Image (tube, grey):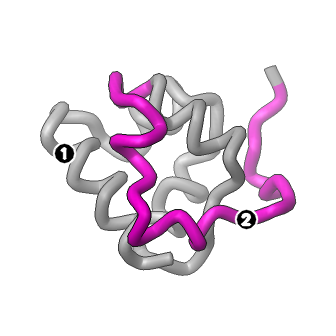
């Protein structure tokens, strides 16, 4: 899960976003961003889509072949209701 988190952090910092700002843009909690970036948790495909949109990249740019296996099959409880 670490590689996916590193990629998210790289894209987030390149855009000058804090974890809180990215979380708000993607509709998730800041704690989920923190846990993903540190490799403690993975993300679902739905969350990957939300993060990719918030970061202005495609899912393919966010999730490479190297970290594809890090996507989870169930939604995290950190997802915010909209």
Residue 51 lies, in percent from the top left, at 50, 36
- Against 65, is 82 above or below? above
Residue 58 lies, in percent from the top left, at 41, 30
- Quarter of the image for residue 80 reads top right
Quarter of the image where the C terminus is located: top right
Residue 78 located within the stretch drawn in magenta: yes
Residue stretch in magenta: 54-81
Residue 68 located within the stretch drawn in magenta: yes
- Residue at image location 39% in from the left, 57% down from the top: 64
- Residue at image location 58% in from the left, 71% down from the top: 70
56 left or right, relative to 24: left
Please rate how many residues cluster around mark 1, counting C-alpha atoms within 10 Å: few if below 14, some from 14 to 19, many from 20: few
Alpha carbons under labels 2 and 1: distance apart: 24 Å
Query: Which label's residue is closer to the chain start, 2 or 1?
Result: 1
| Secondary structure state at the residue bearing disc 1 | helix
- Residue at image location 18% in from the left, 32% down from the top: 15
Which mark is on residue 72?
2
In the orientation shown, which residue stands out farthest toward the front?
65
What secondary structure prevails in the magenta region? Answer: loop
Residue 61 lies, in percent from the top left, at 34, 42
Residue identified by numbered label 1: 13
- Against 78, is 25 above or below? above
């Amino acid at each position: 899960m670490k590689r996916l988190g590193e990629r998210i952090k790289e894209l987030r910092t390149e855009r000058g976003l804090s974890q809180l700002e990215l979380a708000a843009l993607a509709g998730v909690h800041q704690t989920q961003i923190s846990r993903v970036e540190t490799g403690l948790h993975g993300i679902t495909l739905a969350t990957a889509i939300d993060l990719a949109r918030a970061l202005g990249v495609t899912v393919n740019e966010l999730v490479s072949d190297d970290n594809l296996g890090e996507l989870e099959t169930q939604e995290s409880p950190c997802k915010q209701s909209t």
